[in-house]
Amino acid sequence: MPRGPLTAHFRKMAHNNAWANWRLLSACARLSDEAFRATRTSFFPSLHETLNHNLMVDLYYIDALERSGLGRQIFARFVPLAAAGLMEAQAVADRRLIAFCDGLTDANLGVTVTTDRGENGTIEERIDDMLAHLFQHQIHHRGQAHAMLAGTDVPPPQLDEYFLIYDSQRTRDELRRLDLAPPEALL
């Protein structure tokens, strides 16, 4: 399976995405349900709404990438979850995304998949562009949730790390605990 630098990057991003989601949602799971749902200043008015939005959008794009055919039904069927349930559901979605990215080849990156855009019709999107958008979306809203978490009694976790040698031992330990591949296995 030919894998170039961009394919390797998407594989690493999928693993890093799962790790960052786990770190953030582990912190949020320490909040009371009232604190998790409390109104805060951000694009979405609570941690609950922000992080459920992230999961719902992940499910939409993963469905398109996997060509499962649910499209916008994802939004109609989505039931917002409390922090503990959200952590479990996000981990399942993250593993689906990892499996998709682990199966990528350079030849797949320019292939298109169909997205259902409602009244705007169906749009063909390149896989590489969709993955870049999905990771950017996650990072954007995790940052908002991180800032909201700073206004609670639970300290926000470090989220701006990647798979650098500097952090390698702690990274390996957390990834093993999550049953995710350590960074050197992602090359």
Image (cartoon, rainbow, N blue to C red):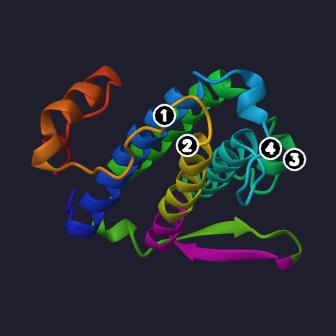
| 177 in relation to 166, above or below | above
Foreground residue among 53 and 186: 53
Percent position of residue 3, x then y: 21, 62
Q: x%, y% of residue 175?
A: 28, 30
Cα separation between marks 3 and 1: 34 Å
Taking the spot 32% from the left edge, 24% from the top edge, the residue there is 179
Q: Nearer the viewer, mark 3 or mark 2?
A: 2
- Give the x, y percent position of residue 32: 70, 21
**Which of the two discs, 3 and 1, labels the residue nearer the N terminus?**
3
CA distance for labels 4 and 1: 18 Å
Q: Are marks 4 and 2 in contact (CB under 8 Å)?
A: no
Picture quarter containing residue 149?
A: top right
Label 3 packing within 10 angstroms: few (<14), some (14-19), many (20+): few
Q: Identify residue type, mark 3.
A: Ala
- Left or right of 187? Residue 137 is right
Q: Is residue 121 magenta?
A: yes
Marks 3,1: beta carbons within 8 A = no
Say which mark, if any, is on residue 76: 3
Identify the residue under disc 1.
Answer: 155
Q: Given the image, on which type of amino acid does mark 1 rest?
A: Pro
> Which residue is tagged 2?
150
Q: Quadrant of the N terminus?
A: bottom left
Whole-Å distance between the Cαs marked 3 and 4?
24 Å
